[in-house]
């Protein structure tokens, strides 16, 4: 019934091959992550990842056959469904630290992963509907609302990593839709106030800088006031917000600044990850041979810290190859976003690029201490069915876009 | 037009995004390059530190043999249980899990955790003599006990047990106080060290050097395997020791010590100074100390009024009583104040008036006129009071100091007492005030009383010098050339004729019908000896015997004391005890010489008793 031709992916074939190749490497690394001498959840889990990969490929084939205008039309419905799931997970969700999982029998899904796709689609639909320049803050009300709603819902789980990714979606979408940099800056400035609010002096300097910036840029008065007020509010909220974080979340941020603070607790992950990677040297300890991983010093070796296993076992050469493959993949996604004529398609693809890029940077950066530990998985390599599925759904959209343009 | 502007902006923004992509990925590559290439050596080491643990392999202590190759101290297979370092909470959890199998109480667990806090980087010794059943119950449940190391550990055993306790000492886990001493600078917590006796004195020889092996552990602290690539340090076993001791004689002394009494005995070879026998009673079983002594038993030993832990041969000092009269005689003859055939102006009529006091002889009816030989044979106090006065306090003090009284002999045992003898007149002034004492102290010193306390080994050394006429030997337990050839710095300074006269008197005291030791004499061997009755403030007089045999060619010198062993001038418990030991030793040395085997008379002759 389905012809061979129909199964053959259309669009950027090399992009597809890169994605599948990376996913297969991921299965291999997850296999290695399970080769430990201490009883571990990770042992044998590569089979599940392989099953998920098959499911993801089937979903890929199905979705890549859906015309883009259908997606454009369905964006609102998908978004609505995603919001319902995000609300549901707050009531029925389970998980070790956060309520992020919904279980359908043996299958657990993370609604946040699919909400990211739905939010991208609706954001792209909204932004592409604007004709002409977007330079009024008031024009941003709808896009802002579209993204802030899922941010609020995932923050309640609480899943800070995902909340940050939604933030990245918003900025990426606005950036790609052509919102002026100055407007973006005004939009982002309250977030920076939130970070700087720990020190009144530093925050005061920042606030003055924003005020000077507004004076020079001269936006509408109401908008300028709004930005200033938002900065004040964010700065004042820093400490209450900090206190509302769970201790493990606080630790992760503190440890990012100084892993020696708590070497047996939160700092353990980072120290062990750096030891594993550093002891890899040029060529690594050999596939499945890394002693740090083998003796269970390396935590979360099949999920968040799978790249540390790459570092320990395949060495700097393996790391370089892996980063180059990821870079090539992201580069091709960016090229699709750049070359496509359709505004909705272009914004969608660029947002997907931004999501995957931030995952790569944050996850890999975290293993060497350049980024705080946030629990964001590494695309294609980290174990996780929902994430792999959402990756290939996103990839299907990118492929469809490249096929249609 | 608008589209063109739009496209231009998108191109710029795409280029910017591309720049960010390439820039940040390059930054990541740089970070990995720094970690994996530039600092890889550091992290390789960190990785090894992470997963390798050094485990000390205890060195077997040297075996200790007696003069005939009989085992005094040996190693038998044993097992230790220790925990690898970790956080106090995980150790406590493991200890609680181990508790039912090792019979650990909450108090012991608290103590162990407290010990771990003081040495957080050292393995924590939980048991150093685990039984086989304890070991097997732990091995069966290996995964339940992460960090737990079970090892072969040689266990010390003393076959002669209590008979040998004070001489050999015992071993135990090094204490925290000891760890801080420079002597134990290389020692790690949990190591066994000699705590007393030979075990302590020859710790450096016996202990050997422990080895180290490396094991790989996982993140839970469980040992995964030996780690071969990192060279282990080989164990150097301790060096064996051979003692001059006659273990059979030692056991005999233990078996024949007067029941219910306290005291001690030492015997040495006068030619070499080798200790043949060194026994103190009451005693204890050193095997009880192995693997940590039970607290209750330790308290019992500590608080026992009979002080079983005290070595009464080298660490205790007693008033030497009449055994000291030979020191007086020697001092006098060496200084020319006494000579063969010396009589004293006043004959013994049971005492001597001096100043406003009357100094008694032990025999109320008196000894009559005596020469030096008779005075020794009968142990006449009156004669020696006058001899002491003739010599004078200064010369007496000088003579005693010359013969080493007041100094330790240098025997190879810890905690030897120097004994007490007044070193000068000033000593008396300081003690009693300038006018608080008189010359009459000389009278007490002359009969081995007063400010005069000596150890058994010191008296044995003096008599050994007297017996041979050679330079005095240094008593020693371990057979070694250096110790055999060592000599004390003093000499008797006695003409040989004078020495023979004294020996003849000592021989008469044992072998002649009216000698003080005659009732207990040996049928087989001619022996010389001096009995002693030491007055003391604690109870009835102590019973002393110091002697040697055979008289012609002395092969053994013995000094024995039984505390309060001379209650009523009727029974002298040290004398038969000491003489039987000498007999036993010489019989075993010359089995070919036929012995009459006449038992000594059971009835004591009242008039011959000192």
Image (cartoon, coloured by chain):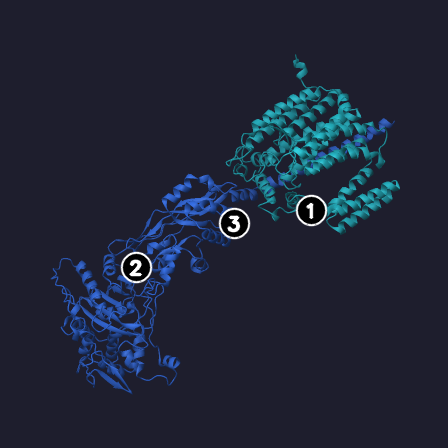
Q: Chain of mark 1?
A: A
Image coords of residue B208 (percent x, y): 38, 52
Residue beneath disc 3 = B88
Query: Is A277 rendered above or below residue B449?
Result: above
Q: Nearer the viewer, residue B496 or A58?
A: A58
Residue beneath disc 2 = B478
- The quarter of the image holding the N terminus of chain B is top right
Horizontal placement of B62 versus B229: left or right? left
- The CA distance from mark 3 to mark 1 is 30 Å
Q: Nearer the viewer, residue B311 or A320?
A: B311
Q: Which of the 4 image quarters holds residue B565? A: bottom left
Q: Residue furthest front?
A: A91
Q: Nearer the viewer, residue A272 or A57?
A: A57
Residue beneath disc 1 = A243
Dot 3 falls on a residue whose secondary structure is: helix
User: What numbered label is drawn on residue B269?
Assistant: none
């Amino acid at each position: 019934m389905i012809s061979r031709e129909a199964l053959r992916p259309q669009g950027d074939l090399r992009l597809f091959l890169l994605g599948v190749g990376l996913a297969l490497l991921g299965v291999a690394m997850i296999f290695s992550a399970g080769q430990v001498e201490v009883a571990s959840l990770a042992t044998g889990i590569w089979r599940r990842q392989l099953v998920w990969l098959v499911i993801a490929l089937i979903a890929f084939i199905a979705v890549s056959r859906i015309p883009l205008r259908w997606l454009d039309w369905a964006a609102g419905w998908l978004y609505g469904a995603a919001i319902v799931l995000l609300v549901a997970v707050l009531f029925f969700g389970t998980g070790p630290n956060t309520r992020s999982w919904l279980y359908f029998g043996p299958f657990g899904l993370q609604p946040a992963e699919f909400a990211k796709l739905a939010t991208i689609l609706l954001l792209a639909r909204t932004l592409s509907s604007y004709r002409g320049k977007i330079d009024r803050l008031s024009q941003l009300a709808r896009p802002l609302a579209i993204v802030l709603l899922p941010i609020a819902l995932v923050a309640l789980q609480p899943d800070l990593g995902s909340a940050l990714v939604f933030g990245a979606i918003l900025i990426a979408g606005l950036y790609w839709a052509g919102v002026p940099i100055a407007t973006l800056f005004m939009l982002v400035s309250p977030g920076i106030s939130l970070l700087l609010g720990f020190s009144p002096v530093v925050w005061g300097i920042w606030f003055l800088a924003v005020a000077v910036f507004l004076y020079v840029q001269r936006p509408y008065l109401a908008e300028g006031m709004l930005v200033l007020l938002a900065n004040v509010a964010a700065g004042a909220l820093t400490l209450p917000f900090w206190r509302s974080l769970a201790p493990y979340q606080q630790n992760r941020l503190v440890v990012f600044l100084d892993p020696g603070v708590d070497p047996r607790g939160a700092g353990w992950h980072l120290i062990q990850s750096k030891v594993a990677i550093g002891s890899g040297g040029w060529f690594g300890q050999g596939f499945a041979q890394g002693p740090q991983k083998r003796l269970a010093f390396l935590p979360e070796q099949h999920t968040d810290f799978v790249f540390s296993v790459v570092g320990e076992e395949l060495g700097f050469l393996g790391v370089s190859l892996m980063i180059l493959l990821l870079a090539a993949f992201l580069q091709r996604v960016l090229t699709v976003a750049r070359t496509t004529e359709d505004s909705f398609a272009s914004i969608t693809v660029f947002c997907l690029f931004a999501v995957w890029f931030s995952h790569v940077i944050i996850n890999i950066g975290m293993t060497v201490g350049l980024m705080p530990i946030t629990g964001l998985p590494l695309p294609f390599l980290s174990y996780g069915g929902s994430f792999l599925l959402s990756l290939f759904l996103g990839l299907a959209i990118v492929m469809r876009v490249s096929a249609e343009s | 037009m608008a589209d063109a502007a739009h496209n231009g902006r998108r191109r710029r923004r795409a280029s910017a995004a591309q720049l960010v992509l390439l820039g940040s990925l390059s930054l990541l590559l740089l970070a990995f390059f720094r970690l994996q290439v530039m600092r890889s050596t550091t992290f390789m080491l960190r990785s090894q530190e992470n997963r390798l643990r050094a485990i000390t392999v205890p060195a077997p202590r040297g075996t200790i043999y007696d003069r005939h190759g009989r085992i005094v101290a040996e190693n038998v297979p044993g097992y230790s249980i220790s925990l690898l370092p970790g956080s106090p909470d995980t150790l406590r959890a493991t200890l609680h899990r181990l508790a039912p199998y090792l019979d650990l109480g909450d108090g012991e667990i608290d103590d162990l955790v407290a010990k771990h806090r003081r040495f957080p980087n050292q393995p924590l010794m939980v048991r150093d003599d685990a039984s086989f059943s304890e070991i097997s119950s732990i091995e069966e449940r290996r995964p339940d006990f992460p960090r737990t190391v079970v090892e072969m550990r040689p266990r010390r055993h003393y076959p002669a047990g209590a008979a040998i306790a004070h001489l050999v000492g015992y071993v135990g886990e090094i204490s925290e106080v000891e760890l801080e001493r420079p002597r134990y600078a290389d020692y790690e917590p949990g190591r066994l060290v000699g705590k007393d006796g030979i075990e302590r004195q020859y710790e450096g020889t016996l202990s050997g050097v422990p080895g180290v092996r490396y094991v790989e552990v996982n993140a839970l602290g469980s040992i995964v395997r030996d780690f071969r690539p990192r060279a282990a340090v080989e164990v150097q076993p301790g060096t064996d020791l051979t003692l001059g001791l006659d273990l059979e004689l030692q056991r005999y002394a233990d078996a024949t010590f007067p029941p219910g009494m306290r005291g001690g005995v030492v015997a040495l070879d006068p030619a070499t100074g080798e200790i043949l026998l060194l026994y103190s009673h009451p005693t204890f079983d050193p095997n009880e100390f192995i693997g940590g002594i039970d607290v209750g038993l330790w308290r019992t030993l500590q608080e026992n009024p009979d002080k079983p832990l005290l070595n009464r041969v080298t660490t205790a000092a007693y008033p030497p009583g009449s055994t000291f009269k030979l020191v007086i005689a020697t001092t006098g003859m060496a200084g020319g104040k006494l000579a063969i055939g010396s009589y004293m102006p006043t004959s013994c009529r049971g005492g001597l008036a001096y100043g406003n006091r009357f100094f008694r002889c032990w025999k109320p009816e008196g000894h009559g006129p005596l020469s030096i030989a008779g005075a020794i044979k009968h142990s006449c106090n009156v004669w020696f009071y006058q001899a002491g006065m003739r010599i004078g306090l200064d010369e007496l003090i000088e003579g005693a100091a010359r013969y080493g009284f007041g100094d330790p002999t240098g025997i190879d045992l810890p905690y030897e007492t120097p004994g007490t003898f007044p070193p000068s007149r000033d000593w008396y002034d300081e003690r009693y005030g300038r006018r608080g004492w008189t010359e009459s102290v000389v009278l007490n010193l002359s009969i081995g009383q007063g400010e005069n306390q000596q150890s058994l080994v010191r008296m044995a050394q003096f008599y050994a010098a007297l017996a041979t006429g050679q330079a005095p030997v240094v008593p020693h337990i371990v057979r070694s050339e250096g110790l055999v050839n060592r000599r004390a710095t003093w000499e008797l300074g006695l003409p040989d004729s004078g020495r023979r006269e004294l020996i003849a008197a000592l021989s008469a005291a044992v072998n002649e019908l009216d000698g003080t030791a005659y009732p207990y004499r040996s049928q087989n061997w001619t022996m010389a000896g001096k009995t002693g009755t030491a007055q003391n403030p604690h109870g009835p007089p102590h019973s002393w015997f110091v002697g040697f045999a055979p008289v012609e060619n002395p092969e053994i010198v013995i000094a024995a004391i039984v505390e309060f062993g001379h209650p009523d001038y009727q029974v002298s418990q040290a004398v038969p005890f000491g003489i039987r030991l000498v007999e036993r030793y010489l019989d075993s040395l010359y089995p070919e010489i036929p012995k009459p085997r006449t038992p000594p008379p059971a009835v004591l002759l009242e008039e011959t008793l000192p």
